[in-house]
Image: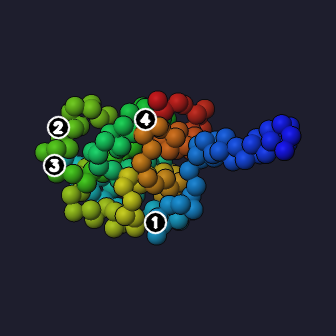
Amino acid sequence: MTRSLLFAAVTMAAIPFLAAPVAAEEPAAAAVKTGLVVGQQAPDFKIKDSSGKLIDLAELSAEGPVLVRLTCGCSGCDKELGYFQALHEAYKDKGLTSVAVFKEPDAKVETYVKEKKLNMLYAVDTDGKSWDVFQTKTMPTNFLIEKGGKIRRIAAGCDPSGLIAQSLAKEAAKLVGEPKAEAK
């Protein structure tokens, strides 16, 4: 085989690998393991925060878009937290409400929240009933809900590189009518 043919063969074989990181920037909706679908009305979801105040998804989504993050304090979710806090900060004054629901013991979450200076609404659901309501077993799973309560985006899985948060930030920007902010 000549050098030019060998070079062409190696180059063609490498193209799918070179394109893979670009494709990963937009997580595939088809890969999401949930009974809910984009465009569907969000489920009736209510949970109490650590102070006993009721967080009611219907009330929140009547005011503006809501990002519900079903999560835990594992190392992957911990690495993602900064991205989601940045997303929250970028759009909270534009009407986005972020809610994190942790599947960890109350005392652990309270320590974690203080340590990480969590700046969004949060609740604890050690029994995992929130995962049942949102029809998912994947942790974390994020539901971006538009004003009025329709599910706009579902993103499941852990991505410590921030690509999922960036993708959600892009959709959140559209919902609040702002340029996309970097969720770093």
Q: Return the disc, 2 or 1, that comes first in the chain's sequence.
A: 1
Dot 1, how many residues are within 10 Å of its Cα: few (below 14), some (14-19), or many (20+)?
Answer: some
**Residue matched to label 2:** 111
Along the line of sight, the residue nearer the viewer: 172 or 9: 9
* Direction bottom: furthest residue: 35
Dot 2, how many residues are within 10 Å of its Cα: few (below 14), some (14-19), or many (20+)?
Answer: few
Residue 122's spot in the image, x, y percent?
A: 28, 45
**Is the Cβ of the residue at disc 4 closer than 8 Å to that at disc 2?**
no
Say which amino acid is labelled 2: Thr
Residue 20's spot in the image, x, y percent?
A: 63, 45
Q: Residue at x 36, y 55 (%)?
A: 139
Q: Which disc is residue 179 wearing?
A: none
Say which amino acid is labelled 1: Thr
Disc 3 to disc 4, how far (Cα)?
A: 23 Å
Residue 66's spot in the image, x, y percent?
A: 44, 48
Left or right of 165? Residue 78 is left
Question: Element at badge 3?
Answer: helix
Disc 2 to disc 1, how far (Cα)?
A: 30 Å
Q: Return the disc, 1 or 3, that comes first in the chain's sequence.
A: 1
Residue 48's spot in the image, x, y percent?
A: 23, 54
Q: Return the disc, 4 or 1, that comes first in the chain's sequence.
A: 1
**Residue matched to label 1:** 34
Q: Residue at x 16, y 49 (%)?
A: 106
Q: Residue at x 55, y 43 (%)?
A: 167
Along the line of sight, the residue nearer the viewer: 36 or 80: 80
In this orientation, does residue 93 appear?
no
Q: Which disc is residue 83 wearing?
A: 4
Say which amino acid is labelled 3: Asp
Dot 3, how many residues are within 10 Å of its Cα: few (below 14), some (14-19), or many (20+)?
Answer: some
Q: Residue at x 52, y 41 (%)?
A: 163
